[in-house]
Image (spheres, rainbow, N blue to C red):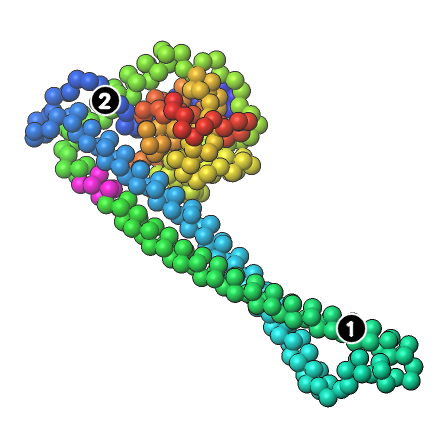
Amino acid sequence: MSGRLLRLVCTAALAAGTVLAPLPAAAVPAPPGAGERSVSQLLTDLQRLYREAEQATETYNGTAEKLRKQRADVDRLDRELARARLSLHDSRGAAGRLARQQYQNSTAISPYVRLLLARDPQQALDEGHVIGQLARERAETVGRLTGSEKKAAELARAARKALDGQLSLAERQKRERDEVEKRLKDVEELLVSLSPEQVAAVGKLEKQGVAKAQQQFMASGAPGAESEPSREGDRAVRYAVQQLGKPYEWGAEGPESYDCSGLTSQAWGHAGRPIPRTSQEQWARLPRVPVRDLRPGDLVVYFPEATHVAMYLGAGMVVQAPRTGEQVKVSPVASYPILGAVRPDGDQAAPVTEAR
């Protein structure tokens, strides 16, 4: 992405909306009618509720991803089981034919007696070779039947276990969906309880918090001199920027709406580099980079639990799907407490336990 395009995007985005940020230490007096809670306390409550909702969302997303993989495993095992049962059917048919042949030939003279009574021992030996060949073929038929039965039984057990796992994950996903909805209802109830004056005061305070956190972050020298994005990183950034203005929706992966990790995973997927679905997995499994070395396309992960993620654009800005009620937008990189950064197209992954 060119510097000129980035500046235009950032300028337009800063004019729209705000995001929750770390609070200044001093509380701002509450406007009339605010009750016992100050504006800073109200904002702190909103921050907590939004964070809890996002954490529940990422937990739900992780279970949804596991359920998707489990369903694929169930489908694969069902196909393998169908093939094994068809093979077992064929093996049983061959075994049945073998049994009928043995029954029909049960009164025949044994090969040893036939050799003793034969007028032409060589001919009897040749016949014995044929009989031996038939015996080996019969043994192979029995072996195939035994192997087919064993494989079908193993696949049937695996398929039942996989299906039980799918049902368990589906039930867990339902509980986690209910938890997300409960958290969002808490947010809604708090917002509804605020007067217009309180809403305006909270909005002003969060802007101040963002500005202060961003100023401190940029003054720290992080990020430093930025390098150009990789070809894949550039494609990921362009995709993410194309989603500006689309609504946040928890659990969504586009194309009409996104949550935070839905946006980042889809952007890198469209760039040809699939990455994990959730912010926690992105933090745990992708190569980490120091925040001072950020380049466009890198993912900035927030909060100690890695419950939020955004894509770095450059010049201290990120594109993100922030929260319920907002849209995909460009924001200051320090809008939330930064945990660290990862580079989906990096070469080496840092230990998962490393903290930034």
Question: How many numbered discs sit on the rendered protein?
Answer: 2
**Residue 205 visible from this viewpoint:** yes
Eyeballing the image, is 354 above or below 321? above
Q: Which residue is mark 1?
A: 132
In the rendered image, residue 17, in percent from the top left (x then y), is placed at: 30, 28
193 left or right of 155 in image: left
Query: Is residue 250 inside the magenta stretch?
Result: no
Of all residues shown, which one is farthest toward the bottom? Answer: 107
Of the pair 25 and 167, the residue shown nearer to us? 167
Eyeballing the image, is 50 above or below 167? above
Q: Residue at x 40, y 11 (%)?
A: 221
Contact between labelled residues 1 and 2, with CB atoms less than 8 Å apart = no
Where residue 105 sits, quadrant-wise, is: bottom right
Q: Which residues are magenta?
A: 183-189
Q: Which circle, 2 or 1, is nearer the viewer?
A: 1
Eyeballing the image, is 180 above or below 229? below
Q: Residue at x 42, y 46 (%)?
A: 65
In the rendered image, residue 191, in percent from the top left (x then y), is placed at: 19, 36
Q: Which residue is mark 2?
A: 23
Query: Is residue 187 inside the magenta stretch?
Result: yes
The amino acid type, in three-letter code, at marker 2 is: Leu
